[in-house]
Amino acid sequence: MASITTWLESIRQDKASMIQWAAAVGVVLFAVSTPGFLSATSIRSLLTTVSFIGCVAVGMTFITLSGNIMSFSIGASMSATTVVFMMSLTLGLTPALILAFLFCAALNGIQGWLIGFFRANPLIISMAAYALIIGGAIYITGGRGIYPLTDETEVLKANLGPVPGPLAAFLIAVIVGQCILSFTRFGRNIYLVGTNPRAAKAAGIEPWRTVMWAYVAAGLFTAVSAVLVAARYRSGDMEHGIGYEYRAISAVLVGGTAIQGGEGSVVRTLAGTFFIALMQGLLILRGFGIEMQYLLIGLIVLAVIMLQWKGRT
Amino acid sequence: MSVSLGSQTIETVANVTVSGQMLLCDPILSVRGLSKSFGPVTALKQVSLDVYPGEIRAVCGENGAGKSTLVNILAGIDRPDAGAICFDGKICTLPSSTEAQRLGIAMVAQELSVCPDLSVLDNIWLGSMDVPFLHRRKELRRRAYEALSLLGAEHIALDTRVGRLTIGERQLVEIARMLTRNARVFILDEPTATLSDSEIDRIFVALARIRREGRSIVYVTHRLAEVFRICDSVTVLRNGEMVGTSKTTDIDRKKLIEMMLGRPFVEMYPEHGYVAGETILQIENLSIPGAVSNFSARVTRGDIVYIAGQVGSGAEGVIRTVAGLVYNATGSVQVNGKALHLGSADEAFHHNISFVSGDRAEEGIFRTLSVTDNLVAARLRELSRFGILNPISLRSEAIRLAVRVGVDQQRLRSRADNLSGGNQQKLAFGRCLGATQAGVIVLIEPTRGIDIGARAEIYQLMRQFCSQGYGLLVASTDLEEVVGVGDVVITMYRSRQVGYYRGKEINMQHIIADITHPLH
């Protein structure tokens, strides 16, 4: 009981989290009052679609926490991973999965190394990587999707009891991601480097190594989403990941992870992901078009950035 | 109390020129009750000051006394929390440096503010409101040349890129920039720190000319010799408070130092140690291109070795090299007899060298993380197994370190930026402890921006570390601290090593002479 009181008190003290709780309550009221929302099918489909973005957002959280703002290329590397996964299915499912994860980890790890070692601007590097990945992929595939002849990927579409498969994967990703951040030396180093890379260096931590591994982690979480999406649509296509980087960073920021790095968590990203997805789902159910969804996400992200900025000064 | 324009002004100027007296006229610049805080740090408390036409006013004080804050307010860069500024008899607010310039206040800032990619000419006219929309190139060139030749710097071509000039020449360009402004009060914040003696002489000629023209100068310096050489009066600040103002003819060097320090040494500084243990750090022929040449030193366990020098003397470079943060250093550094490969912070860390930066916000603490995270940041390897942190030993280690450096255990979970400067510095100190064996701690300006009470605690901590067998190497510009705390003092002047003093040989006069105008 005492802990609940102190918890409420800490919320009352912290203006930003008060706004977050208010927003959460508002969304729940909005949801309950929307006809059709509480039906099992609409909740299921919402939870499934949100999970693909969610896994990428978990990866993006690592990048943001390490002090590198965001990666523009994470959607493209997800698309490229679906292509690699589908192309290598001829080797069998397990080798294809291993290849897909290695590919996505390497793709992001190289960017992380460039950013960490040469102190390159993370946004510029990821923009260059975006163009290189898209260009390279279209060069190899000729711009066509990859449609495998086997149906081995059906196994990835299985559900975990009543829980949709993608949602289970997302929740596991959140748990794993949060455990890495909270309980490992690597996780602690991400916070230290994200807060103050020069102080981290003076404390015997090599910032470039931490940054590189943060990107590798981001690549691995993105690969989870890539194989699930590929299995769902039974294709590898450069279109699959379009817009994922934007939606992922929105989820990270709305969750309350600081854009300048060093503050935030994967659990917060989980909340941010669900918040955005809920808002989108509700707008659809209430009959608003795609333009309203875009406008709303834009406004929310803008509001969050302004609040963060205000909190700092 | 207004000095009206026209005949009266000229008359006043004449008075000043003829008699050298300043009290015949009203002050051009008056300040009353000026206060300013930066977050929890009070930089200025109720400071009042009058500057008269044709006067050169020195502003003296230790580091952190509030000198720069005061002149930044006068130049419209910072805004005061309270107090009034009166320029030429009219109360003004100085909301921006443009407004200050419009009134007739020009400033040379402590940190160089030239644009290295622009030409000398462009830099001189940068930010000037005299420059019309269409450049009158010929006239501007002529006036810029005049300003430079007044400083005896005709050799600096107007079209050279400023990035190609030496630091001293850049400083001259900044002073020339100030001279071209049609100002009535000139502010110089430690303008001579990067200049050679002959350059300083020429600047003084220019300043004397400004004084003859009846214009005023506020001259911030910590070189006491300059106060007596060029200034008419001196205002002393200490910890943001005004100690007093005096004519330079009414005061001597000793009295001025007393005013700046304001308290006996014994209160502040712990007993010297003189443990004289084995050598723990040996530096030989350390050089950094453009910053340090052939520096050698030896630190024994239990010693606090200070490297004293002004900003830019190279003392910081030595410290950063030992900490593994300088990539182009040459020479040999040995820790416990083992050679240190220079240029790797990781390597320095594994040789048991810890680094406490003078720049807490940028390099010292992790502002948004907790006190615990800050204390154990360098110990994570020992506190984890297979990469997994052990929360119990992490917590007990944080408590142990907090007790050792005197940070309240109740605050282990609060964010580091909620702590005072002194407590933040203790976190940085705590991070150096805890290795199984006492090693080397290198520090830059360990008490920069820390108030008096906390300072004494920091000095006590440094002495404690020594008695536990650590060896400390410290770079500092705070001479009082150097004399009060150092067991060995090495002086540096413009990247050269000048003097070496030990124990009883350490004295303020020698050190000041060494770091300002060395004889050899």
Image (cartoon, coloured by chain):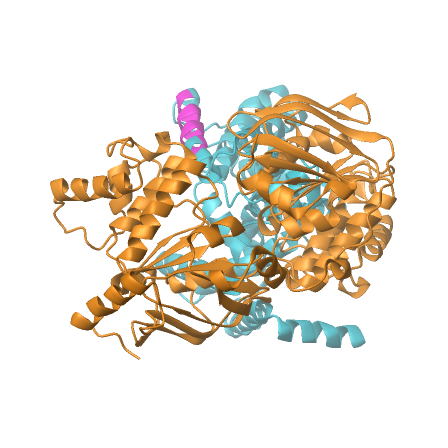
**Residue B440 in sight in this render:** yes
Residue B116 location, quadrant: top left
Q: Where's residue A196, x and y in %?
A: 60, 46
Residue name at image x 43 percent, y 56 percent: B231
In the image, B364 versus B24, the foreground residue is B24
Q: Where's residue B206, x and y in %?
A: 32, 47
For residue B415, above or below residue A156: below
For residue A259, above or below residue B510: below
Residue name at image x 57 percent, y 55 percent: B253
Q: Where's residue B405, x and y in %?
A: 80, 54
Residue name at image x 64 percent, y 24 percent: B286
Quadrant housing the N terminus of chain A: bottom right
Task: Based on the picture, tell me whether residue B368 belongs to the magenta stretch.
Answer: no
**Residue B325 in sight in this render:** no
In the displayed structure image, the side of residue B35 where residue B404 appears, left or right = right
Q: Bounds of the magenta span? A: A129-139
In the displayed structure image, the side of residue A309 where residue B514 appears, left or right = right
In the displayed structure image, the side of residue B175 where residue B387 appears, left or right = right
Task: Based on the picture, tell me whether residue A136 belongs to the magenta stretch.
Answer: yes
Please tell me whether the stretch drawn in magenta is mainly helix, strand or loop: helix
Q: How many marks?
A: 0
For residue A98, above or below residue B175: above
Q: Where's residue B421, x and y in %?
A: 65, 59
Task: In the displayed orientation, state which residue is furthest to the bottom.
Answer: B1
Q: Which chain is cyan?
A: A
In the image, A118 versus B58, the foreground residue is B58
Q: Colour of chain B?
A: orange
In the image, B44 versus A224, the foreground residue is B44
Residue B182 location, quadrant: bottom left
